[in-house]
Image (cartoon, helix red, strand yellow):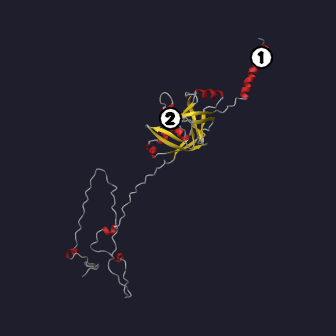
Amino acid sequence: MSRRVRNRRLHIAIAREFSFNMFPEIPRPFNMTYQCYSVAMLPGNERQDVERGGKIIMPPSALEQLTRLNINYPMLFKLVNKKTSRVTHCGVLEFVADEGKVYLPLWMMHNLVLEEGDLVQMESVSLPVGTFSKFQPLNPDFLDITNPKAVLENCLRSFACLTTGDVIAVKYNQKAYELCVLETKPGDAISIIECDMNVEFAPPVGYKEPQQERKEEEEMIVDPADLMPEPSGFVAFRGAGNRLDGKKRKESTSSDASSPKPVYVKGIPDYNYQIGTLKFIRKSVKQKSSEEDDGGEFKAFSGTGFSLRSRN
């Protein structure tokens, strides 16, 4: 082979590669109609992995057609029930279904209002990567989980996308919890494969916040001063007053003016108390004066006087 022929073939190969890079093959949409069944109808062993996620099982012919159409990855599909105009989105788990059939999780069939053997239209779509989602549990029992956010994030690993308005099923400790997708950002349908998404919860349906029982403090109906014993002995400024101009003094209507209440003093804690010590406090008994011994009544100015000047 001459050098001229080899160079010509090399130029042709380079031109072809350059043309492929400049004009890549445009992916064509995938649009098919299948009979849908729940995963329980799939022949063989029970597939709990399908029920716990948001992916479906398709026939092998769908994989061949998707490959020829140069479909974008990850493979995401839009499911439409033409009778009810209900729409949802999903991913694909395996291509092992019988020809003309697809197998869906039970919660997905409920969202689309589909019965066993009904027709569902499938269309390939490209969804934006999710950044935010908000869920509302349909049962307050979901709050009994120790860490519901961690449980939800672990279950969402089996999902490929989320659609606003869907009711997904989350299984934990052999119990299924239904959650409604209230909001998704940046669109009504998002892809959640390898994304960093913020998750929030709305109050569950029928949830009532527990009313905090406020311990009502017992209102003191009686004034603490009224509970103190009446003062005995001399009480300052308890006598009656007289006017200097000779006029009669107006009688006070309030009983507090004639008999003032004693001051209520609270106890003072011992801040110097040391743990493990005992203190015995003894009250000192005050000796009674001779005036109190006689009549028990105090007489003002009844003491003896003394003169500063010495008497001769």
- Regarding residue 9, the answer to whether it shows in the image is yes
Q: Residue at left 44%, top 44%?
A: 141
Give the amino acid at mark 1.
Asn
Residue 195 x, y percent position in the rendering: 57, 37
Query: In the shown orientation, is residue 182 left or right of residue 233?
Result: right
Question: For mark 1, does the 10 Å Cα neighbourhood hold few (<14), some (14 to 19), or many (20 or more) residues?
Answer: few
Apparent side of residue 183 relative to residue 255 in the rendered image (left or right): right
The image quadrant that residue 212 belongs to is bottom left
- Tag count: 2
Quick one: quadrant of the N terminus?
top right
Q: Amino acid at mark 2?
A: Glu
Image quarter of the C terminus: bottom left
Expressed as whole percent of the image width and height from the top left, the position of residue 307 reads 28, 79
Q: Nearer the viewer, residue 38 or 22?
A: 38
Mark 2 closeness class: few <14, some 14–19, many ≥20 residues within 10 Å:
many
Q: Quadrant of residue 304?
A: bottom left
Q: What residue would you read off at disc 1?
A: 7
Query: Residue 43 location in percent, x, y?
Result: 50, 28
Q: Residue furthest right?
A: 4
Reading the image, the residue beneath label 2 is 51
Figure check: 223 above or below 246: above
